[in-house]
Image (cartoon, rainbow, N blue to C red):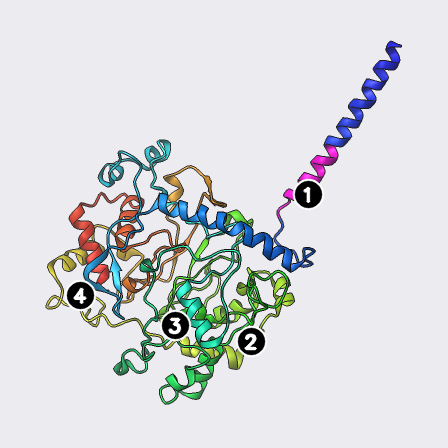
């Protein structure tokens, strides 16, 4: 009897082990990270949309709670300082400090001490996408409304909205300045350039090749979230997006996305759409700067970047294969004409004209090219060295998950031009710095500069003059 009981016990234990192993194998399969997006979608579109619409309020609440925890989001324009088209520039450091801490005390601490005591401002951690687990292109509402008005094309996502307040974003619509016709000033006539008006705006100013380039830049093509398939994120089948839906008027409207060249999802960087102004002096493109010309970038964008770097998905959704010798060339030629905004206080060397600059701006320039070593990466006249640099911010904080984004390391990031920088908020590659004041405070800590309050103000004033 005892032997039979023992035998039953071993059978039960064996069965339990087999069950646990089976469950473990299934769980492991589900947890396998793949570089590829699913191609054959099994869930009906109506069910996907209903599920994501139901989840949207909680998704947006989570992101907006994070922004309020990280930043002072109030509308505080700087007195007498505007972007080149007239929109007010926001002032002040908006990243919040840990309780009981000051910027001066923090700057006097070693990186190891800041990390150990967990004092790195959360506003200086990588900023997640509005829904980092899902990702994809997200447009500010003012842009969605204008495109719908002009073209009837709807860039609304049913699963999430844009997150940052409008007063922290570039002006809308952005002026367009041309290297070939600086005498004309803003050639946009205060309009958002679209397929509906590009011809009337540029006929007689550009040559036929360049006009065709503009047409292609404002023509909608399928993209990961905006297309005809059942895994889109627009309610109706979509014609797609245009290059200028993000690079509005050859500048930027601060649309966000995730970089296409990092896996898994939680390590992908959030993306701040860079301005195309001054593309003619830039030599590195793409989120990992693997592309060496604007032609490479233009071609790659619509073959892979539009689809999260997944050419399998691109084939499914309708990849737009551009012809290099004509279409790519035409698009690139127009982009090469996009100029920086006027900077009346700069001389022909890109430095301040002493007769026009304020004392604070002059002190800021001296700091920029001296004590702060900003010019090592941002030399005049365009204030970029066209290189990559690793700030190693991980010295200051322990890795952590923030709304689906693993805040760990940034790695090397591109030196963006600082000419016209006041026109291009928010800052850094993932929008984490809302103002130029935030940017100065961030680099004061990262470079361990120990700047005074006056020196910080002078640096901000200098950059506003660029």
* Of the two numbered discs 2 and 1 in the rendering, the one whose residue sits closer to the viewer: 1
- As measured in the structure, the alpha-carbon distance from the residue carrying label 3 to the one carrying label 2 is 19 Å
In the rendered view of the protein, which quadrant contains the C terminus?
bottom left
For the residue labelled by badge 2, is the local secondary structure a helix, a strand or a loop?
A: loop
Which label sits on residue 322? Answer: 2
- As measured in the structure, the alpha-carbon distance from the residue carrying label 3 to the one carrying label 4 is 26 Å
Which of pointers 2 and 1 lies earlier in the amino acid sequence?
1
- As measured in the structure, the alpha-carbon distance from the residue carrying label 4 to the one carrying label 2 is 42 Å
Residues rendered magenta in the picture: 21-33
**Can residue 123 be seen from the camera position used here?**
no
Looking at the image, residue 270 sits to the left or right of residue 434; the answer is right
Which of pointers 1 and 4 lies earlier in the amino acid sequence?
1
Q: How crowded is mark 2: few (under 14 residues within 10 Å), some or many (20 or more)?
A: some
Q: Quadrant of residue 101?
A: top left
Main secondary structure of the magenta stretch: helix
Looking at the image, residue 408 sits to the left or right of residue 315; the answer is left
Q: Which residue is drawn at 55% across and 66% down?
A: 226
**Location of mark 3 (residue):** 250
Between 17 and 334, the residue placed more toward the observer is 17
Q: Residue at x 26, y 69 (%)?
A: 84
Q: How crowded is mark 1: few (under 14 residues within 10 Å), some or many (20 or more)?
A: few
For the residue labelled by badge 4, is the local secondary structure a helix, a strand or a loop?
A: loop
Residue 22 among those drawn in magenta: yes
Asked if 140 appears above or below 442 in the picture, the reply is below
Looking at the image, residue 29 sits to the left or right of residue 139; the answer is right
**Location of mark 4 (residue):** 352
- As measured in the structure, the alpha-carbon distance from the residue carrying label 1 to the one carrying label 4 is 60 Å
Q: Which residue is drawn at 51% across and 80% down?
A: 327
For the residue labelled by badge 3, is the local secondary structure a helix, a strand or a loop?
A: helix
Between 71 and 237, the residue placed more toward the observer is 237
Pick out the residue farthest to the bottom.
204
* Of the two numbered discs 3 and 2 in the rendering, the one whose residue sits closer to the viewer: 3
């Amino acid at each position: 009897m005892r032997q039979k009981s023992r035998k039953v016990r071993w059978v039960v234990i064996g069965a339990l082990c087999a069950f646990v192993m089976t469950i473990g194998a299934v769980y492991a399969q589900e947890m396998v990270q793949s570089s590829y997006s699913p191609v054959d979608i099994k869930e009906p579109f109506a069910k996907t949309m209903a599920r994501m619409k139901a989840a949207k309020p909680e998704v947006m609440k989570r992101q907006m709670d994070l922004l309020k925890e990280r930043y002072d989001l109030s509308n505080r324009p700087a007195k007498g300082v505007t972007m080149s088209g007239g929109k007010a520039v926001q002032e002040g450091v908006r990243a919040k400090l840990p309780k009981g801490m000051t910027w001066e005390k923090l700057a006097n601490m070693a990186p190891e001490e800041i990390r150990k005591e967990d004092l790195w401002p959360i506003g200086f951690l990588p900023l997640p996408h509005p829904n980092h687990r899902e990702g994809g292109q997200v447009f500010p509402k003012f842009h969605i409304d204008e495109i719908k008005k002009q073209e009837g094309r709807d860039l609304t996502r049913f699963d999430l909205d844009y997150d940052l307040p409008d007063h922290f974003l570039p002006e809308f619509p952005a002026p367009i300045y041309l290297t070939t016709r600086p005498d004309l000033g803003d050639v946009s006539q205060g309009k958002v350039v679209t397929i509906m008006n590009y011809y009337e705006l540029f006929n007689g100013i550009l040559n036929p090749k360049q006009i065709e380039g503009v047409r292609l830049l404002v023509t909608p093509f399928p993209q990961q979230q905006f297309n005809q398939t059942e895994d889109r994120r627009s309610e109706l089948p979509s014609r797609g997006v245009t290059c200028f839906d993000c690079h509005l008027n050859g500048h930027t409207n601060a649309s966000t996305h995730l970089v296409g060249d990092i896996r898994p999802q939680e390590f992908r960087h959030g993306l701040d759409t860079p301005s195309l102004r001054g593309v003619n002096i830039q030599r590195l493109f793409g989120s990992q700067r693997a592309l060496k010309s604007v032609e490479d970038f233009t071609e790659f964008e619509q073959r892979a970047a539009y689809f999260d770097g997944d050419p399998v998905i691109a084939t499914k959704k309708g990849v737009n294969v551009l012809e290099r010798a004509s279409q790519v060339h035409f698009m690139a030629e127009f982009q090469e004409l996009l100029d920086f905004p006027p900077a009346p206080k700069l001389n022909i060397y890109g430095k301040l004209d002493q007769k026009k600059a304020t004392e604070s701006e002059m002190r800021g320039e001296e700091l920029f090219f001296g004590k702060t070593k900003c010019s090592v990466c941002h030399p005049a006249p365009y204030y970029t060295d066209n290189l990559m640099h690793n700030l190693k911010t991980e010295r200051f904080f322990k890795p952590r998950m923030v709304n689906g984004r693993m805040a760990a390391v940034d790695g090397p990031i591109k030196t963006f031009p600082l000419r016209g920088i006041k026109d291009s908020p928010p800052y850094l590659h993932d929008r984490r710095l809302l103002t130029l004041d935030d940017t100065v405070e961030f680099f004061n800590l990262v470079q361990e500069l120990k700047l005074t309050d006056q020196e910080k103000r002078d640096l901000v004033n200098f950059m506003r003059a660029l």
